[in-house]
Amino acid sequence: MGLVLKAEKINKHFKKPVLFHVLRDIGFEVEIGEFVTIMGKSGSGKSTLLYILSTMDTDYDGKLYLNNELVTGKPAQELSRIRNKNIGFVFQFHYLLSEFSVLENVMLPAKKLDEKSHEEIEHDAIQKLTMLNIGHLAKKRASRISGGEKQRVAIARALINNPSILMGDEPTGNLDSYNSENVFQIFKQLKEEQGLSLLVVTHDLDFAKRTDRIIEMEDGQIINGAYKTEKQIQMS
Ligand SMILES: Nc1ncnc2c1ncn2[C@@H]1O[C@H](COP(=O)(O)OP(=O)(O)OP(=O)(O)O)[C@@H](O)[C@H]1O
């Protein structure tokens, strides 16, 4: 199996209010088609790491590879394009544009990429919404749908450019248990049916236990799970 993501010796400091070493020598890999979770106490550095891995934060030492390509050090415009094409992101809060329709929200990242016609993008967006069983919501205003539906729309939006990896920062953190399970099942289905790679920060042990691998963080370091074990390699 090839790698979708590789981090090498990632270090990060915050300089204010006092010098603080938030990430220390972070090294790990995610294989294509793996469903990996990152866990750790509050303040252990999970979100800080995810912002680096998603290429949104470029202020760090070390190297980050996406699909075997070194992305560290690329100019901002190129990085933005790489991110848009390769990474889907789902947050704890959906960040949908409430005045826009569900369909328009899902289409936005593809419009930004500007590689397909309006009709093609609309077709793709309807296909993603249908796949997530929310095709009937396409014309509704984003402000008019439920919390669980909003998170599914956010997932459809994250998938619109057919990314190679879907990243999530507490994607079930704001949902009740029914909708959390729904999101887990969608992620599992994306892995099993489409071979999508997933990397999710979560506090939910029940969610994490059912993924392929848990990466454990403590005080800015990975203390467990950075690489597949022999057993996991044999089982895959
Ligand atoms: N901009 C910043 N300046 C200074 N310190 C920061 C900054 N952002 C985060 N930190 C600190 O870095 C540490 C790691 O924060 P981070 O948000 O990555 O942790 P986390 O593991 O995601 O926590 P949580 O589970 O609560 O979301 C924390 O001690 C936090 O206070």
Image (spheres, rainbow, N blue to C red):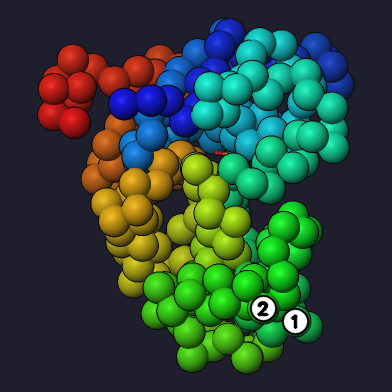
Q: How far across and down, in percent of the image, does residue 53 sit?
A: 61, 30
Q: Quadrant of the C terminus?
A: top left
State the residue position of label 2: 119
Q: Residues within 10 Å of mark 1 (few under 14, many from 20)?
A: some
Quarter location, residue 106: bottom right
Q: Quadrant of ligand 1?
A: top right
Quarter location, residue 2: top left
Judged left or right of residue 11, residue 216 is left
Point out the frontmost of discs 1 and 2: 2
Q: How far across and down, in percent of the image, does residue 93 sit?
A: 62, 61
**Mark sitting on residue 75:** none
User: Which residue is rendered at x = 50% and y = 43% of the image?
Assistant: 164
Measured Cα–Cα span from mark 1 to mark 2: 18 Å
Q: Secondary structure at mark 1?
A: loop
Q: Is residue 72 above or below residue 131?
A: above
Q: How far across and down, in percent of the image, does residue 58 sit?
A: 77, 26
- Residue type pointed to by label 1: Phe
Q: How far across and down, in percent of the image, does residue 97 sit?
A: 75, 73
Q: Earlier in the sequence, mark 1 or mark 2?
A: 1
Residue 172 seen in the figure: yes
**Mark sitting on residue 100:** 1
Q: Secondary structure at mark 2?
A: helix
